[in-house]
Image (spheres, helix red, strand yellow):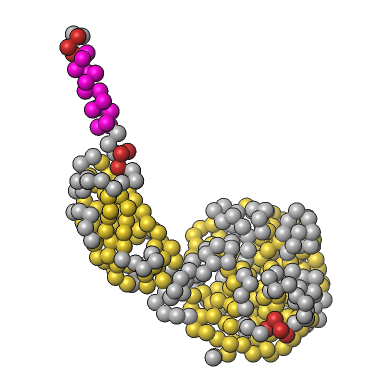
Amino acid sequence: MTAYAKHLILLLLPLLIISCGDTGSLDGIFTIETSAIKNSIKNGGEIAISLKAKKNITVDSVVYDLDGARLGSKKDTEKYTTTLTSPKLGGRTLTATISTPDGTTTTTKKINILHTVAPKVYGYKIINRYPHQTDAYTQGLEFVGDTLYESNGSYGESTLRKLDYKTGEVLKEVKLDNSYFAEGMTIIGDNIYQLTWQENTGFIYNKDTFERTGTFAYNQSKEGWGLTNDGSVIYKSDGTSKIWTLDPSNLSEQSYIEPTHNNGVMSQLNELEFINGKIYANTYQRESIAIIDPKTGALEALINLKGLKKEVQSGLDPDNEVLNGIAYKANEGRLFVTGKHWNTLFEIEIVEK
């Protein structure tokens, strides 16, 4: 190789390196801007989407999608107007795929798709009162026929119980190791599934003997809060805005919904119960129950239970010994609620306000 050729290669090498790195140099150049106020829009609403670039760059085309479903395309970064419709409400991902002479890059933006109507608000009427064990830090409550099952939390005090709901008598009990803080539970067939809080562990028991038959780990969800089922799918809350769907055969997380009303997304949903096709959920430290569509996440109604805590013993911790426990006696169509360390299990009727 001649000296001239070597010199030419040295001159061209930086250009070759820059050219090879052009695609990477697009990272972080573009951001998505929208007309959505506080990144929220009603489902089916119109939205204007555009791109902002940190430097002058030629754009050949932009393709927009919502959670992988194509919305449309533009030949530049100018405003693109479309209608956002999603089968699931809550936080969704808006993606722009940008093609330039130097390569292709993507940028994303989270946007909340809200319910189109405000939740209906119900009141309640107390129908019956039954004794409830005051050592029970209630985290899960569920009927099978006439028998009530309860999961109770706190480190060193966590239990799984079978109860006579009329008398409050504990018919069977298993205590958890002191290192576990029990949370929600649900029952499918002969299996009881019980969550723990931050231990990334769930337990499986035989419904009749309370023998522990298995364990399961959480995946994307980091904590265990509430648990319920519709007969074929298990629903799990984790303290965030998500309610996860689990496969009962292996307890793997399949997908999730985010309970959403007309003004935002709810979080800290705790104890769960599946009633007539809807998820009923306590919200931590609130005196209400949310009624949620399990397919879309739409928060359709709220049951205002304000004043119920005044009907139990005094001296309870206002931050911890709160409403938490929903059980539906399906064979009689009766709804029951209680709270952590409360001395009463209430049968209530939902009433129009």
Q: Residue furthest front?
A: 55
Residue at 43%, 63% in the rendered image: 91
Q: Residue furthest top?
A: 2
Q: Is residue 117 visible?
A: yes
**Nearer-the-camera pick, 34 or 236:** 34
Q: For the image shown, how many numbered marks are present on the structure?
A: 0
Residue at 18%, 8% in the rendered image: 2
Q: Main secondary structure of the magenta part?
A: helix
Q: Is residue 185 above or below residue 12?
A: below
**Nearer-the-camera pick, 263 or 180:** 263
- Could you say which quadrant of the image residue 273 lies in? bottom right
Q: Is residue 33 magenta?
A: no
Residue 167 image position (x, y, % from top left)? 81, 81
**Nearer-the-camera pick, 207 or 26:** 26
- Could you say which quadrant of the image residue 330 lies in? bottom right
171 with respect to 292 (left or right): right
Q: Is residue 189 visible?
A: no
Residue 115 image position (x, y, % from top left)? 42, 74
Residue at 62%, 66% in the rendered image: 226
Residue 333 image position (x, y, % from top left)? 62, 84
Residue at 57%, 52% in the rendered image: 219
Q: Give the position of the C terminus as an image quadrant.
A: bottom right
Q: Is residue 12 magenta?
A: yes
82 with respect to 40 (left or right): left
335 with respect to 2 (left or right): right
Highlighted magenta segment, given as a residue range: 6-20
Residue 143 image position (x, y, % from top left)? 68, 75
Q: Give the position of the N terminus as an image quadrant.
A: top left
